[in-house]
Image (cartoon, helix red, strand yellow):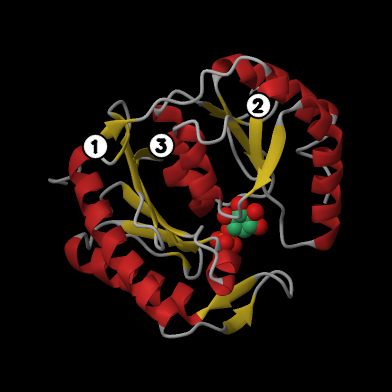
Amino acid sequence: MTGSTPQELLAIAIDVAREAADTAYRMRAAGVEVAATKSTITDVVTAADRAVERQVLDTLATIRPDDSVLGEEYGEGAPGATGSGVRWIVDPIDGTVNYLYGLAHSAVSLAAEVDGVVVAGVVRNLFTGEEWTATLGGGAWRAGQRLRCSTETDLGQALVATGFGYDAARRSHQARVVAGLISHVRDIRRLGAAALDLCLAAEGRVDAYFEKGLAAWDQAAGGLVASEAGLRVAGLRGLPAGPDLVIAAPEALFGPLHDRLDDLDAAGGP
Ligand code: LIP
C-alpha cells in the first residue's frame, strides 16, 4: 500500500499521538475517575483510556482503512478488506495509575508494525509534551536530538528502572527479584509507565530497565526507541522481549543484568 514507509507511518503516528495526548490531557484537567477494573481491583481503566483509544481507532480507520489495530482497551481489530500488512499497536494511556493520581509520568504509545516487525513508533508524555520517536534503522529522537543510551559498564553503578504487575502474587515475586538485585546496582526506580521507562533508558536518564508481564502495547513503540538508541532489548536466554520478561540495557550491562535476573527467576513466578 502507498504511504507505508517507516517515515510515512511515523508521520501519521506522530499526528495521531499528539491529538490523543491532547484529549487525554484535557480529560484529566476536567477530572478523572475509575470507569472499571480489569485483571484485578487495582488494574483500573478510566473513561479517558477508552475515549482516547476510540479516537485513535476512528482516525486510523479513516486515514488507513486497510490497516489493523491492536489496542489495550479494545483488543485486536480486524484488518480492512485488502489487509495492508500494517498493524498499529496502541496504548492510549500507558501509566494509567499515574494518570489517575496526576503523576506526570503517563504517555500515549503508538507503533506501526509491517509484516510483524515494528518499523515506527512514538511515545508522547501527555503531561510534559516530551516526545520520543524512532524508525527501524533510522535512529531514535527527541526534540531534534538523536538519542544514545547510557555508556555505563559497571552494573554496580547502574540506575535500573523496573515495574510491578496488578496481581498481588506477581508483585510479591517481582519484589523478591528487586530485593535480590538491589545490592548489586546503584539504585532502582519504579516510575510506572513501561513505554516512558524504555524511552528514559534510551537517552540514559536511567541506565537500564526490565519488567515482567508487559503486553505488546506497553513495549512496542518504547522498545523500538530503546533499540534504535543502542540498547539491547530482549528476554532471558536468547528469547525475544515479551510477556515473560523485557530487559533493555546497553551491551556492556546486558550480560551482567541478564545473569542476575536469571538467577533471581525474574521471568518466573505467577
Ligand atoms: C502499566 C505499565 C507499567 C507496569 C504497570 C502497568 P498500564 O501499564 O506501563 O510498566 O508496571 O503495572 O502494566 O496498565 O498503565 O497501561
| Left or right: 21 in relation to 39 | left
The three-letter amino acid code for the residue at tag 1 is Gly
Residue at the left extreme? 2
Q: Mark 3 and mark 1: span between their CA atoms? A: 14 Å
Residue depicted at x 71% and y 35%? 187
- Mark 2 or mark 3: name the one nearer the start of the chain: 2
Determine crowd level at label 2: few under 14, some 14-19, many 20+ residues with C-alpha closer than 10 A: many
| Left or right: 186 in relation to 89 | right
Q: Mark 1 and mark 2: span between their CA atoms? A: 27 Å
Q: Check the image and report above or below for 168 versus 186.
A: below
The residue labelled by disc 2 is: 158
Q: Check the image and report above or below for 122 versus 204.
A: below
Label 1, secondary structure: give it.
loop
Determine crowd level at label 1: few under 14, some 14-19, many 20+ residues with C-alpha closer than 10 A: few
Question: Quick check: marks 3 and 1 in contact, CB under 8 Å?
Answer: no
Residue depicted at x 24% and y 58%? 66
- Residue 63 seen in the figure: yes
Q: Check the image and report above or below for 215 versus 101.
A: above
Residue 19: x %, y % from top left: 27, 66
Q: Mark 2 and mark 3: span between their CA atoms? A: 20 Å
| Left or right: 34 in relation to 131 | right
Q: Which mark is residue 260?
A: none
The residue labelled by disc 1 is: 144
The residue labelled by disc 3 is: 225
